[in-house]
Every structure is written in C-alpha cells, then in structure tokens.
Amino acid sequence: MESLAELRELKEEVKDQQADGDKPEIIIGMGTCGIAAGARKVLKEILNEIDKRELDVTVNQTGCIAMCEKEPLVDVRLPGKSRITYGNVGIDNISKIIVGHVVNGNIVNELAIAKLND
Amino acid sequence: MEESTYRSHLLICCGTDCVSSGCEEIKSALEEELANNDLADEVKVIETGCHGFCEKGPVIIAYPEGVCYCELEPFDMAVIVKEHILNGRIIDELLYQEPLTEESISSYKELDFYSKQQRIALANCGYIDPEEIDDYIANDGYEALGRVLTEMTSQEVIEEVKDAGLRGRGGGGFPTGLKWQFAHDAESDKKYIICNADEGDPGAFMDRSLLEGDPHRIIEGMIIGGYAIGADEGYIYVRAEYPLAIERLQKAIDQAEEYGLLGEDIFSSSFDFKLQIKEGAGAFVCGEETALMASIEGKRGMPNPRPPYPAQKGLWGQPSNINNVETYANIPYIMLNGAEDFSSIGTEGSAGTKVFALTGNINNTGLAEVPMGITMREIIYDVAGGISDGKEFKAVQIGGPSGGCLPKDKLDLPVDYDSLIDAGVMMGSGGLVVMDEDICMVDVARFFLDFTQSESCGKCTPCREGTKRMLEILERITFGEGEEGDIELLKELSQNIKDTSLCGLGQTAPNPVLSTLEYFEDEYKAHIYEQTCPGGICQNLLGDYIINQDCIGCTTCIDTCPVDAVTGEKGEVHEIALDLCIACGTCVDDCPVDAIVQE
Ligand SMILES: Cc1cc2nc3c(=O)[nH]c(=O)nc-3n(C[C@H](O)[C@H](O)[C@H](O)COP(=O)(O)O)c2cc1C
C-alpha cells in the first residue's frame, strides 16, 4: 500500500463489487462457538444442497456474532433485500432454507431470528 | 359405505412438483408409521393431484379436520401419526403459515439481546469474512492506519489515545495512552509491541472471538501502537488452545504483508513494521505480562518483579508495550472517530465499551459489548435475558479468578472500573458467570482458589504455600469439618498473600474468598457452626438420602444406583442402605415422583 488514496480506491472497488452482487449470498457463522455447535456439517449440507439443485449462490463465512446460544447461525441475503439471520440451524433445516428462502424468496418463519439492513 | 369406517383421511399431494420435492418418501414413511401403530385400517391415505401449493410441498391435508400440513419431511410422519391421529392434537409447527415478510422480522437492534449493546471492538464480528482482507477494507479497515502514518506524529497519536480515556481491557485498567507514553519516551533503537491473547480466565472467550471474527482490527491497532511508541516489531501471544484464532490471524498477517500494510515503508511513510505469532502453552500465569515476555524469550513462564516495567526493560531487555487484544481493537475506532467521540461513550472514568462473556444460569449465553456504566441488572436481565429455568438470582462472578462475587443488592451497581473496585471486585478481562439460587458460595470460592492454586507457578512462597493453606481450609469447610477461627484465619491469610506475592496472580488470588466472605459470610457460618449448606451443594452437609412414602415402587432407582444401595419389591416403597449410599444423587434425578430427599 503506497498511499491512503490507493487504499480508498481499493475500498470503493470492493464496495462496488459487493453492492452489485446479483447472486443470493449465504453466510455461515464459523467461529469456535459455531463450529462446536455443528457449523461445519451445516456448511457441508448447504454446499450439497446447492450442488444438487445447481444453484448459483455465493457461500461465505463470518466470525462469532455473539449469540453463541443460537449457533449454528446461517444468514441469507437475496439481492436487494436485508440479510436474514437463522438460528439453531441443523442439517435437517437446510433444504427448507434453500428451497423456501434462497430459491423462492420466502423467509422460513420458525428459524428466523433477526434481520440486518446494511 | 365402506369409506366411513375410516377415522381419518390423509390427502397427499403427488403432483409433479411435489413428487420432485419428495412426496414418495413421505407416503411410504407415513404408511410405515400407520402400519406400526396398527392404524392401516383406520386411516386412509389418498394420493391427490396438485394442491397448488407446490412451494410448500410436500403437503398433507388431513380430514375430517381439514388442516393442511406443509413442507413435510419423512421424519415428520411419526409426529403426525402420534399427535394428530392418535392424540387428536393439531401440530402447530407443521401448519401452513403466512410467509413472513421482511418487515415483520425484527432487526438486530430491536432484539433485547442487542438493544443495550454498542459495538466498537466487535463491530465487524459476525458481519465480515475474517479471512478476506478486502472485507475489512470495505468496512473502513486500515483507514485509521493510513491517516496515522501519513497525517499524524507519534506524539499526536498518543495524545489522542490519552484524551479518549482508553483503559486496558486485560484486567488492570491502566490508562493506555500513559503506557504508550512511557514506552515512547524510553530511549532505545529497538522496541517491541506485544498483544496479550493468553485469555486464561475460566469462562472467558472475548479475545478468541475478536481474533477469529476480525483479526485485521487487532493487527491495525498493533501497527498504530508500534508507530506511536517507535517499535518496528510486534508479537501476538496466543494460547495454543485457540487453533482457529491462530490460523485466521496468520492468514490475516500474510494478507496484510501482501498488501504492504505490514513490512517496509508502509503507506510510503518510511515506517517499517513486522508482526509474528507466538503460541503459548496455556498456563494462566503466562498471561501476566512479565511471565508472558519470559515465555516469548523461550524461558519458563514465570513472573519477574516490577520495576523495571516493560516500558523500560521488556522483551529481550528492550522497551516494550503490552496490551490486551480488546484494547488494541479499540484503537482504529478512536483514530477514525476521534477521542471526543470515544470518551462520550461510557462514564467519565471508564470511557468506551467492554466486551463480556456471559455464562452461567442465564437465558442468553454469548458475548455482549456494552457501554461502561451500564448496571449489572441491565446486563443480566436485559441483555442476558434473565435467570434460566425461572430461578432466583443469587450472585454474579466478575473478573475471573482475580475477581469476586456480587450479591443481589449490588445489582444496580454501574459496571465501570472504579465502582467495581469499590465493591471489592474488579472488571478483569470480561468473564461474567451468573449463578442462581442453587449454588454454594463457599464452594464457588473453593472452585476459584483451586484454580489459582494449581496455576500458581511456585516462584514466590506466599502464593505457592498460602493459596494451598487457604484451599485446605475451604475444602474442610465444604466437607463439614470447618472449625471456629477458620473465617478469621482465611481473612488473615488473604491479607498476607495479597501484600507479599510477587505478581498479580497471588495478589488477587484471595479476592473470590474475600468477596464471598464480605457478602455471604452467613453461608460460611452455616457450614461451620450449623453443619448445613444453604445452597444445597456440599454433599457432606446435606444429610442422608431417604425414600419417603410418595415412592410408587417403580424400581427405577434400584436400576440406576451405581453401588446397589437401593432395595425393594416392585410396587412397594423402596429403601436406601445408608452404609452403602455414596450420596451421588443419581436416584434423585431419576425418580419420577421426587420421593427421594435428603434429611
Ligand atoms: C495471573 C495473571 C494473568 C493475566 N492474564 C491476562 C490475560 O490472559 N490477558 C490479558 O490481556 N491480560 C492478562 N493479565 C494482565 C497483564 O499482566 C497485563 O496487565 C495486560 O496484558 C495489560 O494490557 P492492558 O493494559 O491492555 O489491559 C494477567 C495478569 C495476571 C497477574
């Protein structure tokens, strides 16, 4: 990094890229608390499900959002919509979240905890 | 009419869309469940065409009730057969519900858990990908560093940190700006900056979450610290039990090097800085700063007398600055938003926020970052959601093994460095263990002393021998062998150990005993003079287990007793042989009618 201007340029570039993402995004909490609660299995199942249905979805990870009690936490963000957080997600819930929310745009009532507008 | 002999009709949609979402498996699972319950003749399963509800398929409509169960999985069939068919109960969870719209879901800020929180150190945790430096940069990452290196002198940086009123988050609460000033003023051409990520308090995991969730923030804070004191090299001391934190931190360091944010001539400012991780073996005492530096040097992790302080003679004899993970995590925010903004959060003497690890008998365990000055009651009842299982609050332990316990009448105490010290406890690094009515305060003190005693490095006598003697006394009391004079002896030993130990471990080890003596002395007395344990924990004081007349003679306790102490015939009141009983309590937990009590 040679200058502050270069950093700011990179920042705008990344923000642009993230903003005009036209793909649904799934984000999994992969802190120690998430992993201990089974996040790795959940991640695997999500990848399976995406594969099986040949979906074009971005899968990302994040750290602990502090609600360790409700891990595994999975967020879904559809293009132009708020990021919705699901809690206590088990591998049995994945198809519901993917088919219901990611594919059909319906939030899965019983698992949704909160939304994040950003 | 043959049809009318069926007590229920279950219509399964087998249109193409539902077939693809798995209705064949549903149907066979359902038929199997019905057969298992001998219901095949009473319930008719009918395949129908599309119900027009494909998004929610597979769907079952149950008549005569006419209810519609949606999004079924094969394992739901057992529930439908048992609850709906056999018990006649409608299963709410499987009913069709209007899809929630985004508007009807509360935002994070509206959740009780978050509404009283304010996130500075944890701002990015749970939002960004910790393994992507670009994600951090998109959220203002390294902007503070860029400004510091290109627009500020080192003294200006230090003044900003001083004005912000930031105090160390690792336990002691020493003013960070002042500490940086000492290291800055020390003359030497080699200085070090160190991050303390040893995090040894039982129940604490704030630093781990920060390192795992937002490693670049700590790195940025450390580079700024390095610039401020004139260090070109830094160490992060992380316990080896945190493999994920270490992995993410190493990735972050590699990425920062690749971007030229670590290395030579950062932001063309001619400032060089390199950073490395040192894995610690997880001894509690290695969190003490002088022991930590000895450990980095490859020596045994034992503390050394201060002075000299690290700012004069630290790592490898050079001036060094050591701060906690969370302390560094606050630095980029202060540099970006200014001292005034930061000091407006929290209280006058304790600026900013503190991250707590909430554990114990509460509804919402997890991490909470709250403004200083918030009351303990708000943390426990609003953020943590109150005591679990509808029980009563008894005490909260703060400050880890160096801290103490606060009782109910201190719930309205503001949580800041000075109020806590006045109440005989300390902020510590942020562990909060909430305890309900079913706890024995003498046993809690014993637990923490057992911890410090076994973590004592043994270098100085007061800590090595003194904590051992204190532990023996506490063990005697909890065994029901307390004697007159024990309380006085504990107080005297505590004072001596505090006054004469070499490092903070010994100097604070008696705190859990002293604070429980201050607020719960009655419980000590009950153990010693009345041979009772008010919390119902100390087995030797609880009397013998007996089975009363409520016993239904189910033989459960006979089967579960590990030492075959229970005898009796089926249908008759059982009996415990007291000479065999080891008072393990297994039978109490298993008795379906709570007929086993202690007397
Ligand atoms: C026995 C003992 C254990 C300690 N453990 C830690 C620890 O795990 N993490 C930490 O940051 N500070 C710990 N400290 C405090 C450090 O010695 C030091 O004060 C702190 O790292 C300074 O950072 P701060 O000013 O940012 O709080 C411990 C102190 C003692 C006496």
Image: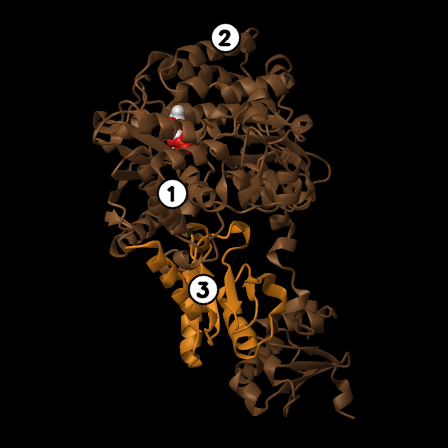
Dot 3 corresponds to which residue?
A42
Taking depth in this image into account, of B189 and B556 the one nearest to the observer is: B189
Q: Position of residue B72 (x, y in %)?
A: 59, 76
Q: Is mark 3 within 8 Å of ligand 1?
A: no
Chain of the residue that carries numbered disc 2 in the rendered image: B
Dot 1 corresponds to which residue?
B221
Chain of the residue that carries numbered disc 3 in the rendered image: A
To the question of a shared chain for discs 2 and 1, the answer is yes
| Number of dots carrying numbers | 3
Alpha carbon of mark 2 to alpha carbon of mark 1: how far?
43 Å
Q: Quadrant of the C terminus of chain B?
A: top right
Which secondary structure lies at badge 1?
helix
Which secondary structure lies at badge 3?
helix
Dot 2 corresponds to which residue?
B492
Give chain A's shade. Answer: orange
Dot 2 or dot 1: first in sequence order is 1
Query: What scheme was used to colour the molecule?
Result: by chain
Mark carried by residue B588: none
Q: Amino acid at mark 1?
A: Gly
